[in-house]
Image (cartoon, grey):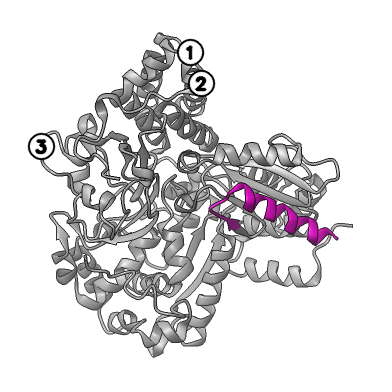
Amino acid sequence: MGRKLLLEKAHVEGIRHYDVYRREGGYRSVEKALKMQPADIVEEVKKSGLRGRGGAGFPTGMKWSFLAKPEGVPRYLVCNADESEPGTFKDRYLMEFIPHILIEGMIVASYALGSNTSYIYIRGEYDWVSEILEQAIAEAKQNGWLGKNIQGSGFDCEMYVQRGAGAYICGEETALLESLEGKRGNPRIKPPFPAVKGLWGCPTVVNNVETLAAVVPIINEGGDEYAKIGVGRSTGTKLISACGNINKPGIYEIDMTISVEEFIYSDEYCGGIPNGKKLKACIPGGSSVPILPANLLLTTAKGEKRLMNYESLSDGGFATGSMMGSGGFIVLDEDQCIVRHTYTLARFYRHESCGQCSPCREGTGWMEKILLSLEKGKGKMSDIDLLWDIQRKIEGNTICPLGDAAAWPVAAAIRHFRDEFEWHVNNPEKCLTENYGLRHYADPIHVPTN
Amino acid sequence: MIQFNDKTMLRVNEIIARYPNGKQKSALLPVLHLAQVEFGGWLDVPVMDYVASLLSIEPIEVYEVASFYSMYNLKPVGKHLFEVCQTGPCMLNGSDDIIDYIKQKLNIGVGETTTDGMFTLKTVECLGACGYAPMMQYGKTYREHLTKEKVDAIIEECRAKAN
């Protein structure tokens, strides 16, 4: 069993509340950090190799070091808790069950960045989670970890929770800042980056929930120790939210050295696929990353076992690989229809496009319509090429990455499952009642025993 | 006249105090949530105008925000709002069947309200509960691992509340 850093205490009764959390060693990292120089904290985070856990995987220490520090201008830390990427539900778990670990990490980060006010922007639908966070913030404040002059350090630290109102796009950091300013969630043109001009035009760091929570073990154990866990540039532990057709959906903390095969089939993790079905495909890092057929998921094109980490999951580029993304792991069994599944994702992105950029606003709608007609047996062979053409024209042609996020799932579905799309065109009646099944991309390793 | 009750007004002022002076527009999303709860589950134009006056911003600044975010209802909804997720991971676990079942059981289509004004059914995109699919939002919380039996129980629960 791998090391647990974030979820180690998840099952301690009452860990949601301050007294238990503190008794179990909580807030030690703040005590340690307040005796350090802010710049040394940033250095520790750099050494840890921590990469942003929201999806992009950008090195956190480096992001912190970009923060502009003009004289007399406030700086802000904003926690991105707008978890909305289909397949991703890990941040909710952390906030719902161990809210203090996020608050602790945010206090350390605030001190390191010189931010006296921070905001947790949480998706509006997590209404009850925002109440849990507010309660935890009140507890931390009562115990002197938030407010003026925390723990007698001379450092002031306020923290507030702000609920969104239903918009995937607000997970994009500049859209999030717009939303926090009380506007529509339209992403901003970059540069300037938030590190220079963020919230209300002030220097701002936006970090994911899991990223900020990971600051706690990094400070407690030291950046070098943290970096020893994992492999290559995938250091530390990662939360994976596993869902779809598996026996044990849920949140798993992995150390990024295990194989994808072990993750799916081991009883310690997903526990295999229900009803003895075979693996057909998987989206390993949230709906935006490329879907892979079973064979390419388990083994890279070089014939190596694929591992659950940043490098291995992206091995082969988009031709034969995918991405770690947000860690939203979606498994599809042999009974699932790739066309229908891709259609639901295209519908999602059409619904969530903010409408600023024409390629995304129009293209996502076209893709949804074409996929629906293919799904309903009303598609033409030329529609498949048209889909390919549209997604290529969205990718890279928009202000924010939502365009890419909408294009990639469609591209990967056609790249790896084109025969299934063609089968829908050639069997307009049959595709309404039957599924294409596995064909050549079946899981080559696992034939269920029961 | 549209006006928040005293308790909500305190909350509004508490929210505005979270931001620097002059940045009270930042309170718009949280205040719209409060308004929707207090004024009948949706945001009528006079309600939005009231929020604009509270935050000293133009009404259009409220309309453009209210129409952008999916949680704000710009039309009346039933007393009980069911928002069923239909995105990929939920679809893999049978959300289509759950949606069909609710439609049939309440005799309404998606986006419609029962004639007695009790129930509204909406489909929504990913609510971040993919491991507990199929699911829906009802009130403040989620109802997860939905089955037809669970849907029956939730509907009964709503009807019991009405009596």
Nearer the observer: mark 2 or 3; the answer is 2
Instruction: Please provide percent x and percent y for residue A443.
Output: 24, 35
Q: Are marks 2 and 1 in contact (CB under 8 Å)?
A: yes
How far apart are the alpha carbons under marks 2 and 1?
7 Å
Which residue is disc 1 drawn over? A428
Give residue A290's position: percent from left, percent from top: 31, 35
Q: Measure the alpha-carbon separation of dots 3 and 1.
A: 37 Å
Q: Position of residue A46 (x, y in %)?
A: 20, 63
Residue A276 versus residue A181: which sits nearer the camera? Answer: A276
Q: Quadrant of the N terminus of chain B?
A: bottom right
Of A298 and B51, the residue lying toward us: A298
The numbered dot on residue A303 is 3
Circle 3 marks a residue in which chain? A
Q: Quadrant of residue A90?
A: bottom left
- Which chain does tag 1 point to? A
Quadrant of res B122: top right
Residue B71 visible somewhere in the drawing? yes
Crowding at label 2, few (<14), some or many (≥20) Cα neighbours within 10 Å? few
Quadrant, the C terminus of chain B: bottom right
Report the residue at 79% width, 55% height from top: B159
- Residue beneath the point at 47% across and 87% down: A143
Residue bearing mark 2:
A432
Q: Which residues are magenta?
A: B142-163
Vertical position of residue A104 compared to residue A334: above or below: below
The residue under label 2 is which amino acid type? Answer: Leu
Are marks 3 and 1 in one subunit? yes
